[in-house]
Amino acid sequence: MLELKHISFEVPEDGVDKEIIKDISFVIPDGKLTVITGPNGGGKSTLAKLIAGIQKPTSGQILWDGQDITEMSITERARLGISYAFQQPVRFKGITVLDLIRLAKGEEISISGACEYLSQVGLCAKDYINREVNASLSGGELKRIEIATVLARGTKLSVFDEPEAGIDLWSFQNLIQVFEKMHREIHGSILIISHQERILNIADEILVIGDGEVTDHGVKEEILPKLLGSSSAVNVCSGRR
């Protein structure tokens, strides 16, 4: 279980500290698919980076299965079973897709085993398995490869920061199926930062962030109708596909 207790995050701006995350507390229960949504600039991606360990909170605690991980690095959190997929995936010159999947899996899996993960994210494995993870790949291709590595890891908590960014319509539809399959088979917690209505529709719980604060949190059946029926729905769910 992931628990955030009174998390705040500030950055210096024009000689003063600007508060991006403001005293946020919530729990991500085990085995649930939770979507964090809200208007652009509200602090969603910053919150994902705080959970992953890319950034450290100014104050507050982050607990993972009761253990305080607030000061742990992204590597230390990964060893505890937390995965993170960037909004803009990292390129690795000199590393092939096969290398990357094997690194994620943590073992020398076969080529056919690695190809299975690529197939799950809608990539023709024979076209990608030996390619370098570099500038020759599009943003959408990199995004799907990164999601394949998260699938390979099969961790207790998988965090996805706007996974729909930069991918085409077919890939987006396939992505929904990937998340549904992960939810059924991995039995870990999934946390997705998104404003896409179709992703909100597969959530167990929805947490709404606005201006650095939690403005609503509950089961999908309770929160989604309020989002779709409010004036802010244009911003929150504007990317319907």
Image (spheres, grey):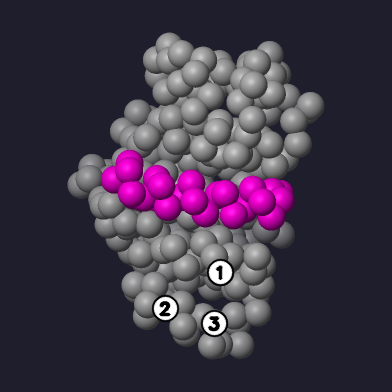
Quadrant in which residue 144 is drawn: top right
Question: Does the residue at mark 1 contact the one at mark 3 (Cβ under 8 Å)?
Answer: yes
Quarter of the image for the C terminus: give it: bottom right
Which is more toward the observer, 8 or 101? 101
The foreground one among 192 and 119 is: 119
Sequence-first disc among 1 and 3: 1
Classify 50 as above or below 193: above
Mark sitting earlier along the chain (1/2) = 1
Q: Residue 200: image x %, image y %?
A: 49, 66
Mark 2 residue type:
Ile
What's the amino acid at mark 1? Glu
Question: CA gap, disc 1 to disc 3?
Answer: 9 Å
Q: Residue at x 31, y 33 (%)?
A: 80
| Residue at image location 71% in from the left, 59% down from the top | 14
Which element type, helix, strand or loop, lies under badge 2?
A: helix
The kind of residue tagged 3 is: Leu
Q: Which mark is residue 223?
A: 2
Q: Which residue is mark 1?
A: 197
Label 1, residues with CA under 10 Å away: few <14, some 14-19, many ≥20: some
Q: Is 186 one of the magenta-colored residues?
A: yes
Give the labeled residue for mark 3: 228
Q: Is residue 48 visible?
A: no
Residue 214 visible in the shown view: yes
Q: Position of residue 41 (x, y in %)?
A: 64, 65
Task: Tell me where residue 215 appears, x and y as whole percent.
Answer: 45, 77
Q: For residue 163: magenta?
A: no
Which region is colored magenta? 165-190
